[in-house]
Image (cartoon, rainbow, N blue to C red):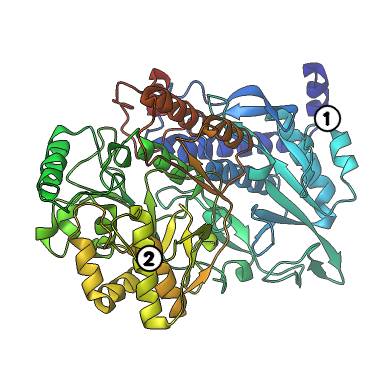
Amino acid sequence: MPVGARRRIVRRVPVPLRASVKRSLASADAVRSAVVVRALGGQRKAGKHTSAGRIRIVRVAGKHVRAMEVPGATAWAARARNLHILVSVLGEAGIDYFCVRGTASPAPCVAVPAGQRAEAEEVLRLLCLESPGYVGTVSPGQMRPGASAASWRALRGQHVLRVAWNVCDPSGHLVFGRESGCDIEFWAEQDGRLVAPRPNRVVTEVPMDAGRCWAEQKRFSAVPAVYTTGHARTLPEFVAALPDDHLFPIDVVYTWVDDSDPAWRASRDTTRGRLTGAPGDALHEQAANDARYTSRDELLYSLRSLHQYAPWVRNIYLVTAGQTPAWLNTDFPGLRVVDHREIFSDPAALPTFNSHAIESQLHHIPDLAEHFLYLNDDVFFGRPVQPGQFFHPNGLTKFFQSKALIPSGRASTEDLPVNAAGKNSRGLIAQQFGTVISQKMKHTPHALRRSVLAEIEQIYDKAHRVTQHSRFRSPNDVPIASSLHHYYAYHSARATIGDIRYVYVDLADAAAQRRLDTLLARRNFDTFCMNDTVTAADPEAQSRMVENFLNAYFPVASPYETASGIVAPRRPARVAELGRAGS
């Protein structure tokens, strides 16, 4: 809209209302600084965030729109910012509102009495003149410029609207628009009561004079525990815990190794030499090949994906063989590096280079929550996820079966290590429950319960002990965390079969580049895994492919990275610069 036209509109708005809009914008900007910029671990200081607040033209769904450039932009911060902007401007303008929970939409929701709709629309239109925003229906479709009166008139027949002030990161790869917006419900006034225009799971009809209360905004739009976004008005009914709320803490556990560490490589090679020195002791070629341990700093990007898309996680534990990534910010609250020596029940089983052995000991991590997600560093969150995709509100876990089948027969030295482990898991389940499992698991985050893992250690004592003491993958291994837990919990009524949108990319496949390009363009999977079990013909080309993809998919640094950025020399410089943004 031309500047002259905007000024003419603003002059027709009463001075007190203009002042309230500006105050709400200032309040929203404070949240942008506190929630988004400090998300990188930096501090708000004058002159340090000159790029924040710059309006850019970006392309969304084939249409050019305006977005605010924000260093450290995340999906959860964009959504929390939209909610904060909305409640701030409504509150400053003296318009009655209350936040709503329990709708089918994942977007935060704010209710306004229908009698105040015209005033609310005028305030929001004025706000969009000051800070470009968009309005549309809650169903998928193009959003309209919120500064245009015609946009609001065209939507007058809709009783629920979606509003959003777009945010993008400095690279332009991430744009958070309507999917991170906030809904406005206009509640009808009937016989002295307010009636909701759509169902929710709490209350859809209240007296017009029903008492309001205050609650933290994070109640309606989740942010990580270390951040705050202020308070908003609501009804007491929407503050109470609901049966489908996940009230228990959920932690995350990673296992990681730095294959470039000379001391670790020497220990591995010495141990492997001892095991393969005698006839009949040869390891399968995939039990200890270099591809199994290759690190391209996938962990850094997996942590970025966690920070970007799962703000509800409590603590993160990184299980390592006495190693710590040089870029890791070990001082960040809720992040802890755990050495194998802290969790192995028998120290004589160390050193180990077998992921099955390490996974068998995860439930020994001190202070680990009963419910946790276990990830390898090549597993990533691809878009916002919710606790309910992994855990039922009553604590039951979910697991995700693959179409890939466990081969028939007993485990042998000729089997691929993954197939031998699957056969061993099948044998244990058949022996105890009388059923024959046939499906492998997808390479997703594994939802686990600490108590189930402890029970497995007791019930299958011998198999558990053998797995713990296998220094490399062995035909006798049991995949405790990635298979046995799920089937054992299922048969004992503590797990269910779940469904998740997931894709697996084999980096050795000739179509890997095309699949990564499609994944980057669409961003339509909840989780994905990039895996290589054999050494590539051109390792350098493969590394470039992976790094280019990860840099583009996860351009925003997480607070788990040090302020000085990435130190690995093979990393492009621009990533280090992003790591410093906001510090």
Q: Residues within 10 Å of mark 2 (few under 14, many from 20)?
A: many
Q: Quadrant of residue 196?
A: bottom right
Foreground: 245 or 251?
A: 251
The x, y position of residue 405, in whole percent, is 49, 60
Residue at label 1? Answer: 12
In the rendered image, which quarter contains the N terminus? Answer: top right
Outermost front residue = 279
> Do we see residue 307 in this rendering?
yes
Name above or below for residue 463 compared with residue 546: below
Please name the amino acid that badge 1 sits on: Arg
Give the class, few, some or many, for how many residues have Cα within 10 Å of label 1's Cα (few <14, many ≥20): few
Q: Residue at x 42, y 27 (%)?
A: 542
The correct choice, above or below, for 565 with respect to 463 in the image is: above
Circle 1 — which element? loop
Q: For mark 2, give the secondary structure.
A: helix
Judge from the rendering whether residue 557 lies leftward or rightward of residue 424; answer left or right.
right
**Which quarter of the picture shows residue 532?**
top left
Residue 59, percent from left and from top: 69, 26
Identify which residue, 160 or 352, lies in the foreground.
Answer: 352
Q: Is residue 370 visible?
A: no
C-alpha gap between disc 1 and disc 2: 76 Å
**Which residue lies under the disc numbered 2?**
423
Q: At which x and y percent is residue 459? A: 28, 79
Q: Nearer the viewer, residue 347 or 509?
A: 509
Q: What residue do we see at 87% from left, 44% from top?
A: 155
In the rendered image, residue 492, in percent from the top left (x then y), is placed at: 43, 80
How many numbered marks appear? 2
Residue in view at x 52 percent, y 71 percent:
496
